[in-house]
């Protein structure tokens, strides 16, 4: 029953905005010393893998490139594995474009249109009516609609911002098409994460701050789920939650190593 790996959310779990959660670096070092593999798994596709590695290391949190998986990169992997190299119209920033290009996909300029096979949407800080129009026209003409994630909000230092879900909802409302979602709580991104780690779901701890994504995703792979109260979901949310309670609730990630040791795992 010993665990072999920990999958950790970032926003609201390891840090909020530019501020690391207190004790996060020390807790993660302890998890490594316990022999656990770590994977930072984020639904936020506004940064590349390299961006996240740089951000974490600048906070004093050790991280290698193979320990980060974003929903943008996972979307790129999923499309390549399922369809090969495809033409994509991105609704997102430069990070999404770079992650799509990483797997050899042809990334089209939304200003020029083209003939995309897929429209891929994520959180876009420069979202506009023109981008919405281009995405909808492509879908009307037969392009498939994919979302890196549908998170309603994004935790920052002391408040929440609108998340990718608001943009995905706008496209869906206009086109009448539901997006194929790659990010948490989808099994798609979790299967990619488990393959990266080389473990089964039952050998994994999934840690996050959001019941509807992190905990639900962990439940779908049979993992041991941990909710931390430093981000999107609160104790009040937990009382109303009806889709599988987390196995453990902690004030923050700093308490995780001691909690796992107390459980006798790994």
Image (tube, rainbow, N blue to C red):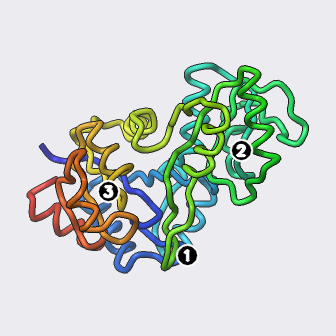
On residue 7, which mark appears?
none
Query: What residue lies at 42% left-to-right and 37% top-to-bottom?
Result: 186
Q: Is residue 257 above or below residue 5?
A: below
On residue 207, which mark appears?
3
Return the x and y of residue 32 as percentages of the image width and height. 32, 60
Q: Judge from the rendering whether residue 15 lies leftward or rightward of residue 222; answer left or right.
A: right
Query: What residue lies at 57% left-to-right and 36% top-to-bottom?
Result: 75
Q: Secondary structure at mark 3?
A: strand
Disc 2 target residue: 91
Q: Earlier in the sequence, mark 1 or mark 3?
A: 1
Disc 1 target residue: 18
Please say if the residues under marks 3 and 2 sit with CB atoms less than 8 Å apart: no
Question: Which of 237 and 86 lies nearest the eye of the viewer?
Answer: 237
Give the total number of marks visible in the rendering.
3
Q: Is residue 179 above or below residue 70?
A: above
Specify few, some or many for label 1: CA neighbours under 10 Å numbering under 14, 14-19, or 20 or more. Answer: few
Question: Which of 264 and 158 lies nearest the eye of the viewer?
Answer: 158
Q: Judge from the rendering whether residue 122 lies leftward or rightward of residue 26; answer left or right.
A: right
Query: What residue lies at 90% left-to-right and 37% top-to-bottom?
Result: 112
Please say if the residues under marks 2 and 1 sit with CB atoms less than 8 Å apart: no
> In the picture, which quadrant includes the N terminus?
top left
């Amino acid at each position: 029953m010993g665990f072999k790996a920990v999958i950790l959310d970032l926003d609201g779990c390891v840090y909020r905005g530019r501020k690391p959660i207190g004790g996060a670096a020390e807790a993660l070092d302890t998890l490594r010393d316990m022999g656990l593999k770590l994977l930072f798994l984020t639904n936020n596709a506004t940064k590349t893998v390299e961006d996240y590695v740089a951000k974490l290391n600048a906070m004093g949190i050790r991280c290698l490139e193979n320990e980060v998986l974003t929903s943008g990169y996972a979307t790129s992997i999923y499309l390549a594995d399922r369809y090969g190299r495809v033409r994509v119209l991105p609704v997102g920033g430069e990070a999404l474009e770079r992650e799509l290009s990483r797997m050899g996909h042809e990334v089209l300029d939304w200003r020029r249109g083209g003939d995309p096979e897929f429209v891929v949407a994520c959180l876009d800080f420069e979202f506009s009516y023109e981008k919405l129009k281009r995405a909808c026209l492509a879908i009307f003409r037969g392009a498939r609609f994919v979302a890196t994630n549908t998170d309603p909000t994004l935790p920052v230092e002391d408040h929440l911002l609108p998340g990718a879900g608001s943009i995905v909802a706008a496209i869906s409302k206009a086109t009448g098409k539901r997006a194929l979602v790659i990010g948490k709580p989808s099994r798609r991104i979790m299967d990619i994460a488990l393959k990266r780690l080389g473990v089964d779901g039952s050998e994994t701890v999934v840690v996050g701050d959001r019941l509807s994504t992190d905990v639900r995703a962990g439940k779908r792979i049979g993992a041991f789920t941990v909710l931390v109260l430093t981000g999107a979901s609160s104790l009040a949310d937990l009382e109303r939650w009806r889709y599988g309670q987390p196995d453990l609730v902690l004030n923050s990630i700093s308490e995780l190593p001691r909690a796992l040791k107390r459980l006798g795992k790994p």
